Image: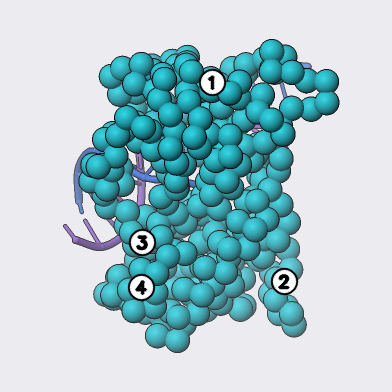
Chain colours: A cyan, B purple, C blue
Amino acid sequence: MPELPEVETVRRGLAPSLEGQVIARAELRRPDLRWPFPPGMADRLTGARILQLRRRSKYLLADLDRAETLIVHLGMSGRMLLSGAAGVLRPGQFHHDLPALQVHDHVILHMASGARVIFNDPRRFGAMDLTPTADLAQHWLLARIGPEPLGNDFHAAYLARQLAGRRSSIKAALLDQRIVAGLGNIYVCEALFRAGISPLRAAGRIGGARRERLVGAIRATLIDAIEAGGSSLRDYRQADGELGYFQHTFGVYGREGAPCMTPDCAGRVRRIVQSGRSSFYCPRCQR
DNA sequence: CTCAGCTCCTGCGGGC
DNA sequence: TGCCCGCAGGAGCTGA
């Protein structure tokens, strides 16, 4: 599922077709995703103009001209697909000639421009909510999320404070959205590989120099992934249906048994399970 | 507070 | 071919 780079890629793909545009009709094809939609969501969206499409952690935030913000989370399997927009139409395809809806197309935003944004999510771990823009930071889903890893508030001194005394693994700590926002299983594995730190290491037992290296590794991994349009495993796609290609760059994720990519390292990638989730790492160059 | 485990849901690939 | 099992990019909740 989408982690920060995938959500950022979706945001960038949707923004040109959504920002400044009016939602002519919001079509809810079921009453809920992970949680019930808020009361009157379809009516509250209908006729609203989207001022700006932002991202916070793995959430997409669409600020509306009615002082409300639409919060969208893609969960494990959520997608936002754009069709019927200028630039997305294939030759010979017209606005009235849109692809048929699929089984798990749960919400459709019909834009006044003729573009259509389809939220598709087979597993329905995704979520949508609408809240006053002024209260956004206090929203229960967003209030306790840590700093953006690509922002100024995420640095070695901050990480030192957060990890101090923690006995759980660094893998678990980096997956904890309260410590740092937006990382998921793939990018934690990849960042730890890049930093040469074992996912098993106790979070509170990483030295200062290595913590600095970790901050740099997290940033670099995310920047490279965004540059590549995210990772397309299984069915993740960008808003225009294109595939990201960062998965071809994975050092360890999904590479169990394969040789380590570090030059001159004779190690092989191992898969272990930590708090119910796969961790991939090279036992030889990650300590 | 911290931490591990469970839970929600569907789909896919591998082994028999 | 068909069935069963394990696994999947998240994260809130529970209980120790």
- Residue A227 image point, x, y percent: 65, 58
Nearest to N terminus: mark 4 or mark 1: 1
Amino acid carrying mark 4 in the image = Leu
> Secondary structure beneath disc 1?
loop
Q: What is the spatial separation of the Cα atoms under label 4 and label 3, in whole angstroms?
A: 10 Å
Amino acid carrying mark 3 in the image = Pro
Give the camera-side residue of A35 and A9: A9
Q: Nearer the viewer, mark 3 or mark 2?
A: 3
Give the camera-side residue of A146 and A199: A146
Residue assigned mark 1:
A112
Q: Nearer the viewer, mark 2 or mark 4?
A: 4
- Residue C7 image point, x, y percent: 57, 44
Q: Residues within 10 Å of mark 4 (few under 14, many from 20)?
A: many
Q: What is the spatial separation of the Cα atoms under label 2 and label 4, in whole angstroms?
A: 27 Å
Do marks 1 and 3 share a chain? Answer: yes
Residue assigned mark 3:
A147
Nearest to N terminus: mark 1 or mark 3: 1
Residue assigned mark 4:
A159
Question: In percent of the image, x 74 and y 18: which residue is there?
Answer: A94
Q: What is the spatial separation of the Cα atoms under label 2 and label 1, in whole angstroms?
A: 49 Å
Q: Are marks 2 and 1 in contact (CB under 8 Å)?
A: no
